[in-house]
Amino acid sequence: MRLRTDKAAHEKLAARPERVVILDPDALTQLDHVATQSSLALEIGCGKGGFIKELAPHFPKTHFFAFEKFETILVKALLKYDQSPSPNITYVSGDATHLAACFKPLSIEDIYLNFSDPWPKARHEKRRLTYPTQLTHYHQLLKADGTLHLKTDNRSFFYYSLIALQANGFAITDFTTDLSHSDWFNVPTEFEARYTPTTPIHALKARKQV
């Protein structure tokens, strides 16, 4: 079922400058100044925010930036945040293609890609969040020991990402093709909690190589 567009979403987000940054593509600025901690992490495509809301309290010394390009969906994440606030989360309304302009090189500890759109058609390959151009941006932003975390239910996208990461400056440190039956520490997303009983979840951790 498609999510009904919230016509007041932009105004709702703009009314929360203490928690939401709305990116202006024509005047991009770095975001690390709003962090309450020196250790920074990113979630790209936070959806309705369940993952980041549950993860952040486990790592109080890390400030999490949750990117989401669809304002209607980000409003849902903000409502969820208000049910149990964590001071170490900042929501970013904007496209992840602007990441390189938003953070200093070598400033990010972890990047999370959860159930990204796999863009399965070959002609859409450049839109994948693990396409080489995007991986170059992640590599530039991550610290020397930084880690990229990926979860997906799409087997083809998983193996595409596995190969692309190793070809673009990352070493795979761990992976599983059945996350729900692994011993990994795992915070499920809303999608994951709903579909894991019938859909195997693939996951990996990739360490930046210097």
Image (cartoon, grey):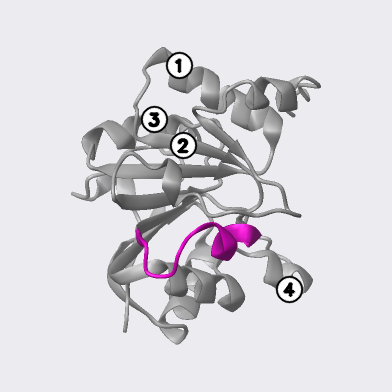
Q: Position of residue 16 (x, y in %)?
A: 57, 23
The residue indicated by pointer 3 is: 53
Q: Earlier in the sequence, mark 4 or mark 3?
A: 3
Residue 100: say if magenta: yes
Q: Is residue 167 above or below residue 111?
A: below
The residue indicated by pointer 1 is: 82
User: Comparing marks 3 and 2, which lies closer to the viewer?
Assistant: 2
Count neighbours of disc 4 (C-alpha within 10 A) and say few if under 14, some if 14 to 19, many if 20 or more: few
Element under disc 2: strand
Indicate the amino acid at tag 3. Lys
Q: Is residue 167 visible?
A: yes
How far apart are the two marked residues, 4 and 1, measured between alpha carbons? Answer: 40 Å
The range drawn in magenta is: 97-108
Q: Quadrant of residue 35?
A: top left
Element under disc 1: helix
Q: Which mark is residue 122?
A: 4
The residue indicated by pointer 2 is: 90
**What's the residue at 42%, 39% (across, down)?**
196
Q: Are marks 3 and 2 in contact (CB under 8 Å)?
A: no
Q: Earlier in the sequence, mark 4 or mark 1?
A: 1
User: Comparing marks 3 and 1, which lies closer to the viewer?
Assistant: 1
